[in-house]
Amino acid sequence: MAYSSKETESFKGVWVFCEQRGGEILDTSYELLSEGRKLADELNTYLSGVVLGNGISEDALKKLGGYGADTVHYCEHELLADYTTDAYTKVLTALVQSKKPEIFLIGATTIGRDLGPRCAARLHTGLTADTTHLDVDTEKYKDFLRQNSTLKVDRMPFKEDTNLKMTRPAFGGHLMATIICPRFRPQIATVRPGVMTKQAYDESKASRTAIERPEVELSKEDIAVDILEIKKTAKDMVDLIGANVVVSVGRGISKNPDEGIKLAEELAAVLNGVVGASRGVVDAGWMDASHQIGQTGTTVHPHIYVALGISGAIQHLAGMQESEYIIAVNKNPDAPIFQASDYGIPGDLFKVVPMLIEAIKAEKKQ
Ligand code: FAD
């Protein structure tokens, strides 16, 4: 029978695209599997990881099970070793058409942002880009709204269904929009790296993971581009997502940006952390975009987040407000960042930060 994305009832299971680069599975895949596991449990269905590549080790594939996948579909072919839009779209589209998952999650990485929409168009279904929250259970979705919106949830009509409710920032981050795709399947969402929490790894589940190797039909003629060379432009990308401590600087360093960044680096060093930045700092050209935290940058939830000279605009908060402890230094006592902070130090960062560094060093010596 011909494939039809409108036959919603015939689609079952939750899939996660597990992106690899150079044979290494990206950390985002584990975050998405952890989230996918929750959705699959609520739908009482299975969770599959999908890997496209060449020569990926059995251990790396089994590891996906340790983060929740029941099965792994591993499409292996020499033309899948490195990403090309044509090859990945062809193989993934064919796999979806044969197995029919109801939900498909893809990391909103540069590759995911290219691949997801292409597949959605081929499969004649919808895609919600850059999501930050997902629900299938209507009651859980209502709880989410109660906690995160001013809507009078209990006075609103809700249809109890298991459509995927895909929430993402809209209108420059001033609104959150929930989008559903009720008439077509699969429901595809790209999910921001760093937003979903990675669950603890379970070795016993990893060893039980079933690995399926679907046949791949692919030839050079399917691919319009030749990869001549792969250059990593952001070689020294800062690992903001995995960091336990992030010390970020904002435009508050403007009177001496070099000195401000140096102080942040010193503070980060004594706390074993990394340095982030507001978009104000990136736009000014003081730091490169790989450091940017926020709605259009990276989302982090470290143990400690230190905001130095950052006002606390909603677009910045969107990327760090889930941090466990937020410490802010700002010379304006009314700066909005203080409302999102656990500890606030009103003062000039150029005076406060050296004192903090000394105090931490002294504490460490004891
Ligand atoms: P400012 O708002 O200028 O704040 C500087 C702060 O430093 C002030 O509070 C001031 O009191 C304080 N200060 C000044 N001197 C000192 C001193 N010596 N010591 C201590 N404090 C001092 N922003 C992001 O950060 N990330 C994003 O991803 C992002 N995405 C965006 C997406 C869209 C669509 C839009 C429209 C905006 C986005 N922004 C983002 C921009 C955001 O709205 C703010 O403009 C930006 O976050 C401001 O950066 P800032 O806090 O460094 O600068």
Image: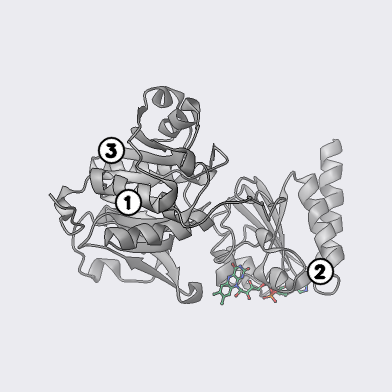
From the viewer's perspective, tell me whether residue 229 is left or right of residue 285: left
Name the residue tied to disc 2: 348
Instruction: Using the rendered view, name the quadrant where residue 163 is placed.
Output: bottom left
* Nearer mark to the viewer, of 3 and 1: 1
Cα distance in 3D space between marks 2 and 1: 55 Å
Residue 290, how many percent across, how many down?
A: 66, 59
Q: Secondary structure at mark 3?
A: loop
Question: In the image, is residue 232 above or below residue 81?
Answer: below
Pick whichever of labels 2 and 1 is earlier in the sequence. Answer: 1
Q: Secondary structure at mark 2?
A: loop
Residue 46 bears which disc, if any? Answer: 3
Q: Secondary structure at mark 1?
A: helix
Residue 87, how many percent across, how many down?
A: 43, 50
* Nearer mark to the viewer, of 2 and 1: 1
Amino acid type assigned to the residue bearing label 3 in the image: Tyr
Question: Is residue 184 something that shows in the picture?
Answer: yes
Cα distance in 3D space between marks 2 and 3: 54 Å
Cα distance in 3D space between marks 3 and 1: 20 Å
Q: Is mark 2 within 8 Å of ligand 1?
A: yes
Residue 280, how many percent across, how many down?
A: 69, 72
Question: Is residue 147 something that shows in the picture?
Answer: no
Amino acid type assigned to the residue bearing label 1 in the image: Thr
Amino acid type assigned to the residue bearing label 2 in the image: Asp
Residue most extreme to the front: 221
Q: Is mark 1 within 8 Å of ligand 1?
A: no
Residue 93 bears which disc, if any? Answer: 1
Q: Are marks 2 and 1 in contact (CB under 8 Å)?
A: no
Quadrant location, ligand no. 1: bottom right
